[in-house]
Image (tube, grey):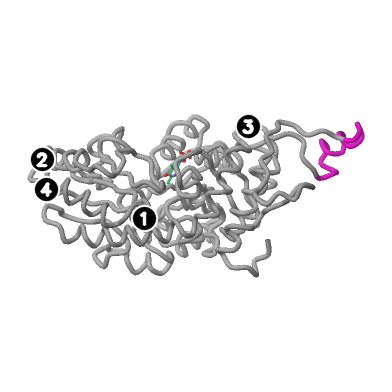
């Protein structure tokens, strides 16, 4: 659908293709393969000289509709959907890296992404250096002539550190490294990294794009040359493609993405402001607060501050901080105790013992993941109920 239409219109309509039945809601093509009119047509499809569907590991009409809709929202030339967010990262790395290459990665990225670089890709002779992603000048200081790929998340999980996207893209451009942003926390509703000159965007569609905690999925977006010529051959050969059913669920997710994000971001801001006023809370991490050290940068590159709020419970010792954090989490009645995020239902988690539990105590300390830290991914419940839930738990 043409870019002359506004974002909200494209979110519900872009990419739709109708069959001969003229169905209104997108058709779900649960088929592994496609049939041909003749042996000659089969040969042409396999050779790629005739466009068309062949096999759902390569492409499928429901998956294509999801890819085109997401590409329209991110402002990308092209998009490939994958079985998960991690599959999108893996396929992009396999398509662009080789033995001897160097990767620069934000030190605060998703744990499985660190594992992918440090354990899996390291076995194939790819070297990785972790960068304090939000420090001005850190990327330029760490880049080397062998750096082929630069990878970051902004805002980061759970401390909401912001990477300056224009600077990140410029360092990649100057040094010939491919720049990739995991846009999971913002979604294209809040931030479109490609507009800053970043080369590729990764999504864990499992989070806000679905938005209702139903399916696992992912995507990679960028230029046609990167996506069609580099990533697609790897994806169709290695197999982590998105199932048509999940693509159909994600198409429905995209239709409500903008309204969900705006409502969840609004509640998150109110909750963050309220938390700052509560006794027993040492610090609130949220880019929409004036107290956030990078609030101005966040306001420049994000249309809204996001829907994840982290805060630290006060305590004289790490043991006391942990006890308070666990008591607060256990005292909530509305929120779900789970490490997932991006759901319509608010989730509450203790990063130090869950998402970041496998890090050494020193690594956690360096990353600022204290024992008192609690993360809330704000959902669509009434803000008054969320505040009362936390007020009761804080008092308990
Ligand atoms: C969840 C997540 C991923 C991984 O996505 P999966 O769909 O679980 O594979 C990657 N990056 C971020 C920021 C995430 O939150």
Q: Is residue 156 above or below residue 353?
A: below
Of callouts 3 and 4, which one flags the residue occurring earlier in the amino acid sequence? Answer: 3
Of callouts 3 and 1, which one flags the residue occurring earlier in the amino acid sequence? Answer: 3
Residue 309, x across and y down, in percent: 30, 53
Residue 202, x across and y down, in percent: 52, 48
Main SS of the magenta segment?
A: helix
Left or right: 218 with respect to 374?
right
Of callouts 2 and 1, which one flags the residue occurring earlier in the amino acid sequence? Answer: 1
Residue 30, x across and y down, in percent: 67, 34
Q: Which residue is mark 1?
A: 307
Evaluate if marks 2 and 1 touch, with contact meaning CB atoms under 8 Å apart.
Answer: no
Q: Which residue is mark 3?
A: 239
The residue under the point 30% across, 35% down is 354
Distance from Cα at disc 3 to Cα at disc 4: 51 Å
Q: Is residue 115 above or below residue 303?
A: above
Q: Which mark is residue 361?
A: none
Magenta span of residues: 37-51
């Amino acid at each position: 659908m043409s870019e002359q239409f506004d974002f909200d219109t494209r979110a519900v309509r872009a990419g739709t293709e109708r069959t001969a039945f003229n169905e209104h809601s997108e058709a779900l093509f649960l088929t592994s393969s496609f049939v041909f009119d003749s042996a000659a047509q089969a040969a042409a499809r396999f050779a790629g000289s005739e466009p068309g569907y062949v096999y759902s590991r390569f492409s499928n009409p429901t998956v294509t509709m999801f890819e085109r809709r997401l590409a329209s929202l991110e402002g990308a030339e092209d998009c490939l959907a994958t079985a998960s967010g991690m599959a999108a990262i893996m396929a992009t790395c396999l398509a662009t890296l080789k033995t001897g290459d160097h990767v620069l990665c934000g030190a605060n990225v998703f744990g499985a992404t660190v594992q992918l670089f440090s354990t899996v890709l390291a076995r194939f002779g790819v070297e990785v250096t972790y960068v304090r992603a939000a420090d001005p000048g850190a990327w330029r200081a760490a880049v080397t002539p062998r750096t082929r790929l630069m990878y970051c998340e902004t805002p980061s999980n759970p401390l909401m550190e912001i990477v300056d996207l224009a600077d990140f893209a410029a360092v990649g451009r100057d040094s010939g490294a491919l720049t990739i942003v995991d846009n999971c926390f913002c979604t294209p509703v809040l931030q479109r990294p490609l507009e800053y000159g970043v080369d590729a965007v990764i999504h864990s569609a499992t989070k806000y794009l679905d938005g209702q905690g139903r399916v696992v999925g992912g995507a990679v977006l960028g230029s046609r040359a990167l996506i069609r010529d580099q990533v697609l051959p790897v994806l169709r050969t290695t197999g982590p493609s998105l199932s048509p059913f999940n693509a159909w669920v994600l198409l429905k997710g995209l239709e409500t993405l903008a309204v969900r994000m705006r409502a969840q971001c609004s509640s998150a801001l109110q909750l963050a402001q309220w938390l700052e006023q509560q006794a027993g809370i040492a610090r609130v991490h949220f880019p929409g607060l004036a107290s956030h050290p990078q609030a101005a940068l966040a306001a420049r590159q994000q249309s809204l501050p996001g829907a994840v709020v982290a805060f630290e419970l006060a305590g004289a010792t790490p043991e006391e901080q942990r006890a308070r954090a666990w008591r607060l989490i256990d005292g909530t009645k509305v929120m779900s105790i789970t490490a997932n995020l991006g759901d319509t239902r608010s989730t509450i988690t203790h990063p130090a013992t869950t998402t970041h539990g496998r890090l050494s105590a020193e690594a956690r300390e360096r990353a600022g993941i204290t024992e008192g830290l609690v993360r809330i991914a704000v959902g669509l419940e009434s803000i008054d109920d969320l505040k009362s839930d936390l007020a009761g738990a804080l008092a308990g």
